[in-house]
Image (cartoon, rainbow, N blue to C red):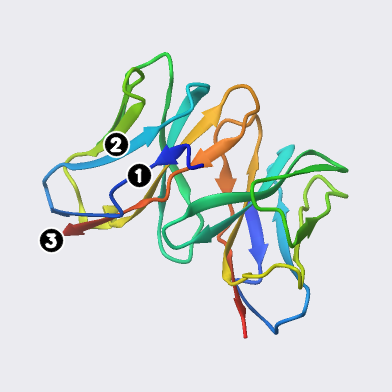
Amino acid sequence: DQQVKQNSPSLSVQEGRISILNCDYTNSMFDYFLWYKKYPAEGPTFLISISSIKDKNEDGRFTVFLNKSAKHLSLHIVPSQPGDSAVYFCAAIDGEDNDMRFGAGTRLTVKP
Amino acid sequence: DGGITQSPKYLFRKEGQNVTLSCEQNLNHDAMYWYRQDPGQGLRLIYYSQIVNDFQKGDIAEGYSVSREKKESFPLTVTSAQKNPTAFYLCASSFNGYGYTFGSGTRLTVV
């Protein structure tokens, strides 16, 4: 049972435009959400997070939006840069058992 | 510099052999985790350990074993019972359970 879903396996955008990566979840006990960025043959690196008590968190070019009623979060990257090309994983933490669940990832390609 | 070291980066194993993947951290993190990544599957939890000398099975523990004799070390053994061991393995650690630091991964290939 996949509790965190990233339904788009890939996304391609032009440099300078906005990239929007989406993530849906099913477990209402998730209270903390994270985005990780992963380059090939490397471990994921933390990008940005949001607590369930907030609906938006911004860090430079990266903004994460959380819609609890829809059980949906999204990562916006603006402006997108070629160096942003990577696989992005959405992750969620269940506050009861501290287990972190990952989505399948979305491969973002930013074209110059 | 603090971090997590996984070794080796690439590993080849013959069918029927056990193999151990190393994971060492100097972050003084209590919790450590092993994940497996397969294409289109995201990261799936194999085993995790919250404290020394204690560990729990994750979602896909069958065919794997771990030990946690030291806080810094959490080796993963892929046994011959694991039916499809070819994958990318990631080790992670966490201080408070919120946000992990990952190693650079080990790609295991069964030949």
Residue at 57%, 45% in the rendered image? B101
Q: Residues within 10 Å of mark 2 (few under 14, many from 20)?
A: many
Q: Nearer the viewer, residue B5 or B61?
A: B61
Q: Position of residue A60 (x, y in %)?
A: 27, 33
Q: Which residue is mark 3?
A: A112
Residue at 44%, 35% in the rendered image? A34
Q: Which residue is mark 2?
A: A75
Q: In what element is the residue under mark 2?
A: strand
Residue at 78%, 53% in the rendered image? B73
- Which quadrant would the C terminus of chain B be assigned to in this image? bottom right
Q: Is residue B43 left or right of residue A65?
A: right
Q: Which residue is mark 1?
A: A6
Q: Is residue A29 left or right of residue B39?
A: right
At label 2, the amino acid type is Leu
Q: Position of residue A20 (x, y in %)?
A: 22, 40
Q: CA distance from mark 2 to mark 1?
A: 12 Å
Q: Chain of mark 1?
A: A
Residue lying at the far top in this picture: please name it: A53
Select label 2 or label 1 by which is in front.
1
Q: Nearer the viewer, residue B26 or B83?
A: B83
Q: Residues within 10 Å of mark 1 (few under 14, many from 20)?
A: many
N-terminal of the two: label 2 or label 1?
1
Q: In what element is the residue under mark 3?
A: loop
Q: CA distance from mark 1 to mark 3?
A: 25 Å
Select label 1 or label 3 by which is in front.
1
Above or below, B85 relative to B32: below
Q: Position of residue B16 (x, y in %)?
A: 76, 80
Select label 2 or label 3 by which is in front.
2
Q: Chain of mark 2?
A: A
At label 3, the amino acid type is Pro
Residue at 54%, 35% in the rendered image? B99
